[in-house]
Image: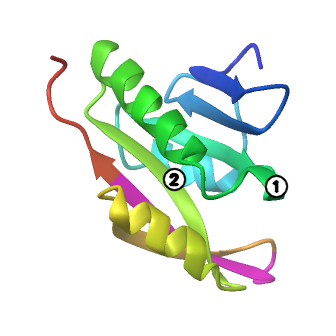
Amino acid sequence: MAEAFYARRVGNVAAFLLAFDQDADYDSPNYLWFRERYPRFVYVDRIVVAAAMRKRGLANRLYEDLFRAARVAGHERVVCEVNSDPPNPVSDAFHAALGFVEVGHAAIHGGAKTVRYLVRPLGPAP
């Protein structure tokens, strides 16, 4: 948590989002993929919404707040990965609706999982 650029929750833990910027001391292979390619970014490590709290817009609210915080800090992009094998069509559709686009892919954990790397460009801070 001390390395996080952004860490927010809704309620007691109805939903949460954890993100790191390019300066975090973090060794996730997905995070490192972005760090090798972009000088500045905010990486979404986790977004979780409790099953009973889904379809209430909580993930959208967390992402919109993250986008605002990233813009204010001078970032131009928010990045993340989504599993492609095993597939995660709900996450794919959610991130596409937010404006994320694919910029790469990789097999990780010895090929046990494949991911798609996504970027969401940010406009200037209001």
Q: Which residue is mark 1?
A: 52
Q: Can you give x and y, in whole percent of width and height, for residue 86 in the image?
A: 72, 85
Q: Residue at x 66, y 46 (%)?
A: 47
Q: Which residue is mark 2?
A: 80
| Residue 7 vs residue 53, the one in the foreground | 53
Label 1 sits on what residue type? Ala
Asked whether 115 falls inside the magenta stretch, the response is yes
| Residue 58 within the magenta-colored segment of the rendering | no
18 sits to left or right of 51: left
| Residue displayed at 34% across by 14% down | 73
Residue in the foreground of this view, choosing between 61 and 21: 61
| Residue 9 sits above or below residue 84 on the image | above
Question: Where does the image place residue 8, in percent across and percent down from the top left?
Answer: 66, 24
Q: Hey, which quadrant is residue 103 in on the image?
A: bottom left
Task: Classify the position of the N terminus by image quarter.
Answer: top right
Query: How far is mark 1 from mark 2, CA to CA?
Result: 24 Å
Q: Which residues are magenta?
A: 110-119
The reply to whether discs 1 and 2 touch (Cβ–Cβ < 8 Å) is no
Vertical arrangement, residue 116 with respect to residue 69, above or below: below
Q: Is residue 4 left or right of residue 52?
A: left
Q: State which tag comes first along the sequence, 1 or 2.
A: 1
Colour scheme in the image?
rainbow
Residue 32's spot in the image, x, y percent? 58, 47
Left or right? Give the position of 65 relative to 101.
right
Check disc 2 and report its element: helix, strand or loop.
Answer: strand
* Residue 97 to residue 106: above or below: above
Magenta-highlighted stretch: main secondary structure? strand
Callout 1 secondary element: helix
Residue 25 appears in the picture as rendered? no
**Amino acid type assigned to the residue bearing label 2 in the image:** Cys
User: Which quadrant of the structure image shows residue 97?
Assistant: bottom left
Q: Residues within 10 Å of mark 2 (few under 14, many from 20)?
A: many
